[in-house]
Amino acid sequence: MRFVGGKFLHLIVVILAVTVLTFAMLDLLPTSAAYAVAGANASAHDIAAIQEDLGLGDPALVRYGKWLAGVLRGDLGVSLVSGQPVAQAVASHLPATVELVVLAQLFTLLIAVPVGLFSAWRVDSRFDRFCSALGFGLTSIPSFALAMVLVYFLALKLKWFPAVGYAPLSAGIWPNLKSLFLPAVSLALVEWVILMRVLRSELIATLQEDFILLARAKGLPAWKILLQHALRPSLFGALTVFGLQVGNLIGGAVIVEQLFALPGIGRLLLAGIFAQDFTMVQGCVLLIAVAYVAVNFLVDVGYGLLDPRVRCGGVVRG
Amino acid sequence: MDRKAGGVFWLAVAWLVLVAALAVSAAWWPLPAPDQIDWVRLTAKPGDGGHLLGTDSLGRDIAARLLFGARVSLFVGFLAPCIGLLAGGLLGILAGFYRGTFDALIVVIIDTLLALPRLVLLLVVAFVFGSSLFSLTLSLGIVIAPSVARIVRALTIRIAEREFILAARAAGASDAAIILREILPNVLMPMLVYMLVITALVIVAEGSLGFLGLSVASPMPSWGGMIAEGRDVLAEHPHVSMIPAAVMFLTVLAVNLLGDRMRGWLDVRESQL
Amino acid sequence: MQTRNESRTQPAWAMGLCLLALLAILIQGAPASASGPVQGGSLTVGIEEDFVGFDPIKARFLGAMDRNVLLAVEERLFDIDAKGNLVPELALSASTSADGKVWTIRLREGVAFHDGTPFNADAVVAHWQRLLDPKNRYMGRSALEPIESVTKADDHTVRFTLKRPWILFKTQIGSAGFAAVIPSPKAVQEDTQNRAPVGTGPFVFKEWVRNDRLVLVRNPNYWRKGRPYLDTVVFRPMPDMQARFSALQAGQADAIVTDRGAHILQAREDRTLKVYSGDFAGPYTFLFNSSKPPLNDPRVRRALAHAWNQEFLVKADFRGTIPVVADPYGGSPDCGDSGYRNHDLAKAKELLAEYGQPVALELAHTNTPRGKEAGEIAQRLFKEAGVTLTLTPLAPGEVFRKVMNGEYQISSWRFSDYPDMGPYLQESLGSKGRVNFSGYASPAMDGHLLAQATSNDAEVRKKALCGVARTINEDAVFLYLGGRRFHILAKADVQGLSAKQHPVVRVGDVWLAGGARMQQAPR
């Protein structure tokens, strides 16, 4: 329990530090939020009035204090630009992001695990070489180029999927999945490679250990050796990578969200930075940081499940 | 593992040498300046009007822009990982070696930088310092540093527990001597391999930033910017976007292949990274 | 018709063909439209950015896309036609007193807001008093300064009392801006108007999910019987222009708003798509800061005007889909060439030589592909004249800040569009103008501006406005980056669209040929 307690404290400190850092960085920017809000025909008088309305006149430390006090009361403030409560805006952008991450990582797993297992079982086979070459190719393309190609062929030429737009779950599960398929695939096509490589190399090492050789000697079928004996001890690296990927995709899939016009957190954040909508940026950053930290926490818990020794705090893995 | 170099490896090396040579000699080729506009030939096909690879939608020579763009990609691709490696490596080794409160502090810094959305960092740097080659390289370096620090720290902890470190300590070696003579060489090798992986990622990242319009300032061309600029004429003049995309693809592929072979030779396991 | 013509002589036969062709043009080749508007169906419109908000005070300014919704959900007292005449909407008639200082407006009876509140004089008066009250700090209040008060004469009559006769009253009341549209007083009072607008219009607001969609549904109780035709309208913000065009091609959007030349040309070639265009005032410009050296020297500004090449920008960046302009009026009034300074490198160099010092400048532009491209062209053009230009891409709010505080040398700047540009230009270019951010001042300009402001005579005003345009070019106050042409690309079966009157997709007039086609049918 002490392990969990110490970890928890660490996480709180990290989240606080992220918000302080964001606030400090935003403070470096010229405060032109009032100008963005007022539009092109405002007078100096109007601008001053808006500055006051938005509370931008206070020093940064006071504003941070107010913001933090609000957050502790469960109030993320309102958008400087639209006046919409930040919590409401973030909540309305969450479904698309969460669904995109879940679907993308599902595809990633569906490709990476079988390929990793098979490649490790038959190292340097034709399949292994083909997959590693394919992997090199896919990781050498920016995801937006990949998305452009997918849209061109699968949406515009074949019309199998919508080219852009998000159909919420309320519109039905099938339209919802169809609208997220291309964005998720364009993310997964890059992500699986990294996951597969890590998994493959750990599997290769595991497969050389004594207990596997023993299992082989006993004549167990390949699938049984791989799935029941080799996979579990080879998952540490893959789990780390998987956690990092999930953490990065929350709010980090900006380009894909932009290309497919998905209402995700990344787009909200990007628009917030461009409009210098500080409260909105802070809200997004808070959510992203909490999500990142939570995912990492789960990964740590995952280590414990894979290997009970971790609970004593002994094993440190990159 | 396959320890032979092989034809593919030499092809990759040859491509990278070629790109590097062209980037260095960019200004000496008999090509139009990368920002010079051919007023009458917009989106010209390769070969038209003396434009080897055609022109983009503003009538600028694609070949010339590729050469100068190579400077950006290689500069960023080489220097940003170096910055990340230096800063991250230093923090990681110190944290892993000294542990204790100092380590706890470094871990908080690392986790904070990792949890901070990269976009915020990159955009704020671009807004405050302008989108110059220098600020782009620096901000990408800062983005890289925490992941490097995390890995180096884990490696250092593992190495510091080994017998030869204890032996050195028993022999009265100072901390600095242990770090420089015993730990650094052991951390360096896997890190150099890792650097090639990062180089590939950074070149792609520059492309993505170019797509968002956040890469280097004009008139300096960048590959990512070129791909993005050609996007809206993709249907009728695919070469404007596809030529820089192909060059970027081949370059990143070459770096990736190089990294893979070196990993094979040095026998660095992927899971260590 | 054709059968009757067959036996006639050849010229008549040819004339018949011509008539047929004319008819075909008139009905635009869609056989279904011959039967007139059809009820039902859903229309999805892809727009450039998300909406800002719909309450005039809460939203603070009218976002570029907001009018699309504003004019579908809410209505004005009057629309205004191309000739400047009032066309009754929520009002029936307007009459002015002999001294021109009182306007009496009779309102339509039996109209109700979507929330059930009756539309009457109280609603109109409440709206106007709210805007005019200085406490509320309505951003557009200074433009309404001549209005003394708005009062209720009886339940369906309101009276606008002016401080002095005001020729722009009709323009204000019929504009497509915030002041002219009448919101439900209940929604305003309950503070829901900004995010869930309520009006009397053909469509009822249903939902707005930020960055994703804004949905309108048919108003079953609309006072214009038989209108609107569509059951549902969905606006989807798609900031990426490629995504917007892909959405139209793949069928996720029935109409899109775009200014991308390549897509407009492609749509013209595509038989399944149609292009609607309209020209408006308020050009895109590079604004010079005339208050600081070196741009306070007219010779430098003139040199840059000759180094600049608007035709090339329009050709390269817009593929010729927007007009090259020499004045800020979008065609009304038409001022001819206005002494526009053409691309002339020799002359540019000559003027710079006269100035005698090296010129290095910074251009602040919006961080968009459009801003970047125009900047890169300027950078190269100026370089050929010997002027070094540094580009600084900025967020839109930051461009505003720099320009408003005079912390810039050259900046990308879009002039607002008004049916009558006169008063706005007076504020923007006059030596005492409230929004004169260029720091430009000249007696000649002030003279023309005063002349247009003080006259009620159309010819005199036209002459004065063209004088303004001529002085802009003479003194090179700013550079034109092409005129404002608004484009809608739509599927061929979308009928009733027009881009002429306002830069808005007027969904209230739209119907789908072939009736209620299934929009979301599985493919």
Image: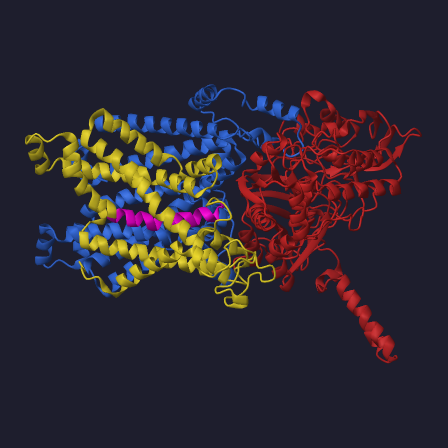
**Residue C165 vs residue C119, the one in the foreground:** C165
> Is B139 rendered above or below residue A201?
above
Q: Which residues are magenta?
A: B193-213
Give the quarter of the image for residue A299.
top left
In the image, residue A185 lies in the stretch drawn in magenta = no
Query: For the point 33% across and 34% down, which residue is it?
Result: A294
Q: Which chain is blue?
A: A
In the image, is residue A191 above or below residue B46? Answer: above
Name chain B's colour. yellow
- Residue C400 appears at what percent x and percent y? 60, 34
Q: Quadrant of residue A4?
A: top left
- Predominant secondary structure, magenta span: helix
At which x and y percent is residue A42?
A: 66, 30
Percent position of residue A131, x then y: 29, 60
Question: Is residue C331 in sight in this rendering?
Answer: yes
**Chain corresponding to red in the figure:** C
